[in-house]
Amino acid sequence: MQFLLAFAVLGPLVGAAAALLPAPPGLRGSSPDQAVLRHGVTVTGTILLATVVLAIGFDHDHPSKMQATTDISWIPALDVRIHLGVDGISLPLLVLTALLTFLCALYSYFNMPAGPSPKAFVALLLVLESGTLATFAVLDLLLFFLAFEIVLIPMYFLIARWGGEARQPAAWKFILYTLLGSVVMLLGLLLIGLEAGTFDMVALATDNGRGLSTSVQVIAVLAIGLGLAVKTPMWPLHTWLPDAHTAAPTVGSVLLAGVLLKMGTYGFVRIVLPVAPDGMQTFAPYLAAFAVVGIIYGSLACLALARSGAGGDLKRLIAYSSVGHMGFVLLGIATMTPTGVNGALFANIAHGLITGLLFFLVGAVKDRYGTADLDTLAGATGAALYGRAPRLGGLLAFAAVASLGLPGLAGFWGEMLALFGAFDPADGLSRPAFLTFMAIGAFGTLLTAAYLLVVVRRVCMGARPQEAHDEQWAEPLADVRAYEFAAWTPLVALTVIAGLWPAVLLGLTDPAVQQLLAGGKS
């Protein structure tokens, strides 16, 4: 188990270095480009297998216990250690990261985005995977910061070199926002480590803030929270996200929404809640307020983009929807209750599955039409996906109703539990205020349903064109291809399974959350 976790974290780095080497003659296939893309599929598939075996071997009777741990002294003078471990909170995120990266590598093998050498693309994809897996596996504050930062550079280059229009400004905006947030976060992490005398996250969580004064906790939560809020992203620190998603290649958008956004909310649960509970209680009402504003703002922005004549971009719309969905995650965390935090963790996984699928589908639609402009996709006479590519249209409608929180699919449980947590927040928090936040969040679910149903109606439905000059819309489109079916089926299946059997995921997270909150009410 120790070897598997260490291999999952470090294996992609070795694979990235190997991707830059010349392919052996016997493994080149039809071209060196094909060989390196196949290498990416092989490495990410191996890492996925390792995380699945890790999940199977995980002691499910004790999910609150850190397992597969490695603890080696690295910088003795600062008591910084190479400390790895996995529990019921981090295990689902590790598997989700490995799965989405493998599916992106598989998709890219058949549909490589336009840009420079595939060698660099595969190497950056693997470095990104390693940094993300490390973020969810490390148990030292400084290592967490290093892993948190590793992912920024490969994502910057994926957007800047393989993205679409306006990719350079979007990439610069992404890197500047996240780096500035990280600088502030580092100051908070150093404050906690130096004041407590250790950077070990397990020891700090066990101490539960008793070794830190209230003023230190408040300052630390403010600093760390700002850095994590940029990555989440929380309104009003979200403005880098729509541009980055719109410009990124399909696989970049999938990983950005499905994995990178989870790093911010994971930091709130793993570090802020257990290490500085008094500071978190001070800022919890403000975090909840920003969260529900983000829910409403994201939904209204999507409605504005979805209306006829607005010239809205479908990728940009899905990006704004992420602001709203992550608002529910932040609301659940702000309640400081097991119910709310479990809902936040469930919504994290559900968002990764559903929004990852949505970006895959929007990328496929853009490939076929040559645009993601909603007015063009809708067409004056109905460029209806149901009639032209019925399987693609059906999958897009499925992902949309999953995203709006239809009961029986994964999107429902996280949002519902977050709202339930707001109904009865932790002791010391204002219940009238959180009841107000709950009502606003519930209204946001209605707005979410409205804009997603508008998108389905405009893109998937419509009459067959009748006039001669509209005959271009009558031609059939290529429906779901074999490699697309292979890449999307796991996300569809897991969305259904998580919706029908939520206890599989909640059974992992709940004991770990109970322990992190150190006696928080159930």
Image (cartoon, grey):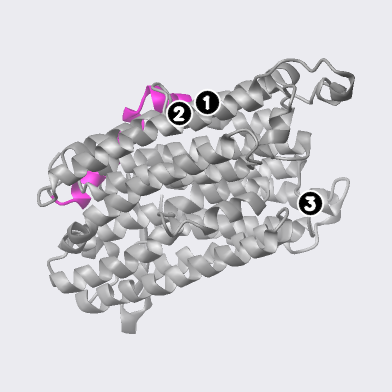
| Residue at point 24%, 46% (across, down) | 513
Left or right relative to 286: residue 448: right
Query: Is residue 379 or residue 193 the one in the foreground?
Result: 379
At label 1, counting other C-alpha atoms closer than 10 Å, the crowd grade (few under 14, some 14-19, many 20 or more) is some
Which span is picked out in magenta?
A: 496-518
At label 2, counting other C-alpha atoms closer than 10 Å, the crowd grade (few under 14, some 14-19, many 20 or more) is some
Q: Amino acid at mark 3?
A: Ala
Left or right relative to 14: residue 65: left
Q: Position of residue 392 (x, y in %)?
A: 67, 25
Query: Furthest residue to the front?
Result: 309
| Residue at point 85%, 46% (across, down) | 29
* Secondary structure under the numbered disc 3 in the rendered image: loop
Q: Position of residue 384 (x, y in %)?
A: 70, 22
- Camera sees residue 96: no
Left or right relative to 253: residue 143: left
Determine which residue is flagged by label 1.
Answer: 453
- Cβ–Cβ below 8 Å for labels 2 and 1? yes
CA gap between label 2 and label 1 equals 6 Å
| Residue at point 82%, 20% (across, down) | 474
Q: Position of residue 133 (x, y in %)?
A: 48, 54
Image-quadrant location for residue 176: bottom right
Image-quadrant location for residue 469: top right
Question: Which is more N-terminal, label 2 or label 3?
Answer: 3
Q: Position of residue 398 (x, y in %)?
A: 54, 24
Determine which residue is flagged by label 3.
Answer: 114
Determine which residue is flagged by label 2.
Answer: 449
